[in-house]
Amino acid sequence: MILRRLTANLRAQNWTAIAIEFLIVVVGVFIGTQVSNWNEGRKEEAQTQRMLAQLIPELQSQLEFFDNTRAYYGTTRRYADEAFAGWKGDPRVSDEQFVIAAYQASQITSIAINPDSWSLTFGGEPLRNIDDPKLRRIMELILTADYSVVSLNAVATQYRERVRRVIPARVQEAIRRVCGDRNVQAKGGQVIIVLPPRCALKLNPAEAARTAAALRARPDLVGELNWHIAAVAAFRENAVVLELPIRELYRELSTSL
């Protein structure tokens, strides 16, 4: 209809009508484009909100990993103190307890975080679609953080390797079987690793005595254990730094979505 009127006006050289018709076409295209962009923006915003809502259980799982890691390394530190007492010849620590503690002090775990998958989901445009500047800032902190400081490599010290060179393999196997890491299902459904705080393993007295003597013949392991404790302490401090924005994001999303 507009095209026919425009053609007729051109033939009649009715420039005022032509201008009006042209303006109607331009305005119509502009409004149509704006409506399309608005609808697309609403779709992107809704998708971003869905992704943020789906992130809540993942954040909860990560926080449970942080909590569990604190408990885990609290347990290894108690074993380390008992091992120190064994190297000092404390009569309250038997050879059996000494051997078990020296091994358990070398146990390590890490925090299961996959920032690459988060970056693929929220990097670039999805991140810019988060309207709340506070949420966007927290997400930026989480996505750009260095998670290598809470990896297994951060706590895989020489003490772990060297003490296990001294303790016979069959003793290590017995400790792992009775008192080693246990896979436990957490509240969120994910599996976390727990180290039993006490070990009721009964070693052969003669083998326990031989292994304890071999450990005491390696006083350098005391220094290695000191360094291992320092590495674990740095791990725990770095974990706290990484945990804060995750906990803040979880709190913000839980209350706003």
Image (spheres, rainbow, N blue to C red):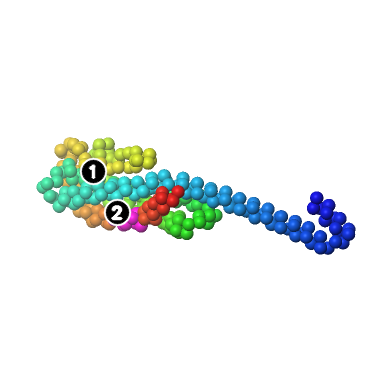
Majority secondary structure in the magenta region: helix
Give whichever of 128, 28 is nearer the camera: 28
254 left or right, relative to 211: right
* Residue 142 horizontal/vertical position (percent): 43, 55
Label 2, secondary structure: give it: helix
The circle drawn on residue 197 is 1
Q: Residue at x 81, y 63 (%)?
A: 16
Indicate which disc, 1 or 2, sits on the residue closer to the N terminus.
1
Question: Which residue is the extreme one toward the bottom?
Answer: 15
Q: Residue 212: horizontal and vertical position, in percent?
A: 18, 45
What residue range appears in magenta? 233-241
In-image side of 208 versus 2 (left or right)? left
Answer yes or no: is residue 166 visible. no
Viewer-nearest of discs 1 and 2: 1
Q: Nearer the viewer, residue 105 or 25?
A: 25
For the point 33% across and 55% down, the residue is 240
Residue at image x 53%, y 48%? 46
User: How far apart in space, not on screen, are marks 1 and 2 (Cα)?
Assistant: 17 Å
Mark 2 — residue? 232
Q: Position of residue 239 (x, y in %)?
A: 34, 54
Q: How many marks?
A: 2
Tell me which amino acid carries mark 2: Val
Q: Is residue 57 left or right of residue 126?
A: left
- Image vertical order of residue 158 relative to residue 176, above or below: below
Task: Report whether residue 230 is seen.
Answer: yes
* Residue 240 counted in the magenta span: yes
